Image: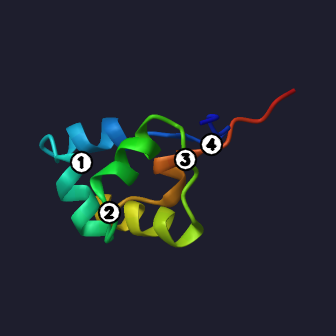
Amino acid sequence: MASTPIQNSIRALRFARGEMTQQALAEACGVTRQTIIALEAGKYAPSLELAFRIAHAFKVGIDEVFQWPRTP
């Protein structure tokens, strides 16, 4: 499985929120734990709806969760 160019801060945000588990985040977003694992590993780019759900779960803006580094 190829990695995606979209980077994310999911792991850091989980730990900043009292070490939220992958399972707790998955349940808050209506997805499986395996989806969260794949997202954290950068192997999967979320749908726009899922990206918003994750940001909402952390109570932050979507740009604090996901980043698209620009290439020169």
Residue 50 higher or lower than 65, as above or below: below
Closer to the N terminus: mark 1 or mark 4? Answer: 4
Residue 53 appears left or right of 13: right
Disc 3 from disc 4: Cα separation: 9 Å
Marks 2 & 3, CB-CB < 8 Å contact: no
Marks 1 & 3, CB-CB < 8 Å contact: no
Closer to the N terminus: mark 1 or mark 3? Answer: 1
x, y (%) of residue 66? 53, 48
Residue at 39% over, 61% down = 54
Closer to the N terminus: mark 2 or mark 1? Answer: 1
Quarter of the image where one finds residue 68: top right
x, y (%) of residue 1? 59, 36
Marks 2 & 1, CB-CB < 8 Å contact: no
Q: According to the image, label 4 marks what residue?
A: 6
Q: According to the image, label 3 marks what residue?
A: 44
Disc 2 from disc 3: Cα separation: 22 Å
Q: According to the image, label 1 marks what residue?
A: 22
Residue 59 badge = 2
Disc 1 from disc 4: Cα separation: 19 Å
Closest to the camera, between mark 4 and mark 2, is: 4
Disc 4 from disc 2: Cα separation: 20 Å
Closer to the N terminus: mark 2 or mark 3? Answer: 3
Marks 4 & 2, CB-CB < 8 Å contact: no
Neighbour tally class for label 1: few under 14, some 14-19, many 20 plus, Cα within 10 Å: some
Neighbour tally class for label 2: few under 14, some 14-19, many 20 plus, Cα within 10 Å: few
